[in-house]
Amino acid sequence: MADPSIERFRRVVASAYSSLEARRQEVNDLNVFPVADGDTGDNMAMTMRAVMEELDRLDDGQSLDEIGREELVAALARAALMGARGNSGVILSQIVRGAAEELASRPGELVDPVLVASAFGKAADAAYASVREPAEGTMLTVFREMAHSISRQLAHIEPGRQRLSPSATSDEQDDLLADVIEQAIKDGQKAVERTPQQLDVLAEYGVVDAGGYGLVLILAGVLAALRGEDADLPVIEHQSVGFASKPQHANSKFQYCTNFIVSGSGLVRQDFVGQLEDLGDSVLVVGDESTLKVHVHTDDPESAMSVFSDAGAVTNLDVADMRKQVAEREARMASHPTGIVVVGSGSGLQALFVEMGAHVVPGGETMNPSTSELLAGIREVAAECVLVLPNSSNVIMAAERACELSEKSAEVIPTKTQQEGLLALIEFDPESGAARNRLRLGEAIEGITVGGIAPAARDDLQGRFMRGDAVGFVEGEIVAWGGAGSTLASTIEAMSGGAELITVISGDGAPIPLDELDAHAPDDVELELHEGGQPSWWWLLAGQ
């Protein structure tokens, strides 16, 4: 049976990770200091995920006492260290280590405001100690301010609520801790918003500190777990997308963000820092006598590793090209005012959507992507505002939820078919604002008539057709059935009353070749033909 303490801690860590993951790309795009050492959001998320996975490994039915508190702390600290990458990940790993050591240091005590204040204080000390020359206006400052917030709150908490008795219920404990954490988040937000006043480079780029923002998001996840609800992610004013991207400042003179683990005995981290600083900058060496995590920006990763050739085994090498990352970030930031996401199924249709400037979320055979897939699609679009075309009535609710969860402005244009979405895209202008595009696409949709021909999946109860026969639809109503050619012709005829042009999109397994379809149209109707490759439907039709 799982230990409730470990299970509870794992739930809190998982919620913290999910909160950060929801804004990971936004945190990535904020990173300008000290240099673009990988992506801050990715690096911090990797650290949190490593801790979560270690808790999964430990939670195999043993109790906390059977595992051992010291063993648990050592395992979590090592997992965070091994999973860390970049400055932000390494510093976060030290926050995890410091907090875990303090929380596990008092057997038999419930986690209460006094213990949390002590844990935050020790974590802040561990984070500052990991950096040789700490800079204010970074994640170090933000975490210290959150630690100070909890300490200040102790002075205003009734003595009977500062410490919890062993008889306190889990709900009482969660409620008390949630109140303390909620205020720490508010003070952390203020600290993040002040970071441009503390670091000139942040003011120059019009952003807040990425690592500090990440810490506030992590704590928001902790609060959500304590309250038993979804994380209400903080909104911190910053220029998250579309800011004028420039080459990184003068400190970015080295190319490779280099990370690795050194395993040995009697390791003293200070013995290696000077040699690494001769090879690069942003040097971090943290760990203990048996394991060190090394982070350095350098042009020569091999020489950085050779510093430890006589000290122990070098493993877990991770090298990221920071110049490439800067170029990728600049490309992401070179955004249009409005972007568009569509759900698509069929290789030909997806290619058409991309050709018309849309980002495609694959719908699969059932046109049913998840909310998370739609949210990821919204994040991928380099635009300040995003319009989403679900292209299926079954996807509209998931698309609306994705837009609600998006950190950037996003809204749904409720297209119900792929052919409707395709014709609406003709009116899309990425250089226009969202309001104008919403109006243009909405007006286009109102004038579209949609239809389609598909093979019957079963015999008709009214005896009109049998399984495998062609069935033609216009606006969801059956208008024709029988052979493929005659059903196609009758369906086009039914749509042609007010349309001079019918778009025909040929699907997977369509029984009539595309170049023979013109013969099935009335003389006064022109067909625009496309290979869509969509499943289930032999032909999708749209008229304007």
Image (spheres, helix red, strand yellow):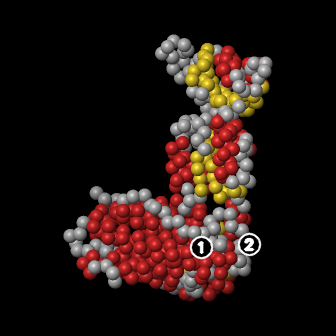
Find numbered disc 1 in the image and state the secondary structure of the residue it sits on: loop
Residue 247 disc label: 2
Say which residue appears at 34% left-offset and 83% top-offset. 155
Q: Is residue 267 visible?
A: no
Q: Nearer the viewer, residue 496 or 311?
A: 496
Indicate the amino acid at tag 1.
Val
Say which residue appears at 71% left-offset and 31% top-offset. 544
Vertical comparison of 450 with 298: above or below = above
Indicate the amino acid at tag 2.
Pro
Q: Is residue 342 visible?
A: yes
Residue 161: x %, y % from top left: 27, 76
Residue 355: x %, y % from top left: 74, 44
The residue identified by callout 1 is 208
Say which residue appears at 73% left-offset and 32% top-offset. 530
Please rate how many residues cluster around mark 1, counting C-alpha atoms within 10 Å: few if below 14, some from 14 to 19, many from 20: many
Q: Nearer the viewer, residue 37 or 70?
A: 37
Residue 490 disc label: none
Taking the image as shown, residue 356 lies to the left or right of residue 17, namely right
What count of labels does the image hold?
2
Say which residue appears at 61% left-offset and 78% top-offset. 196
Find numbered disc 2 in the image and state the secondary structure of the residue it sits on: loop
Mark 1–mark 2 distance (CA, rounded to whole Å)? 18 Å
Which tag is nearer the camera, tag 1 or tag 2?
Answer: 1
Quarter of the figure with residue 194: bottom right
Task: State which quarter of the image contains the N terminus.
Answer: bottom left
Quarter of the figure with residue 528: top right
Please rate how many residues cluster around mark 2, counting C-alpha atoms within 10 Å: few if below 14, some from 14 to 19, many from 20: few
Vertical comparison of 469 with 422: above or below = above
Residue 16: x %, y % from top left: 45, 64
Residue 112: x %, y % from top left: 31, 74
First-in-chain label (1 vs 2) = 1
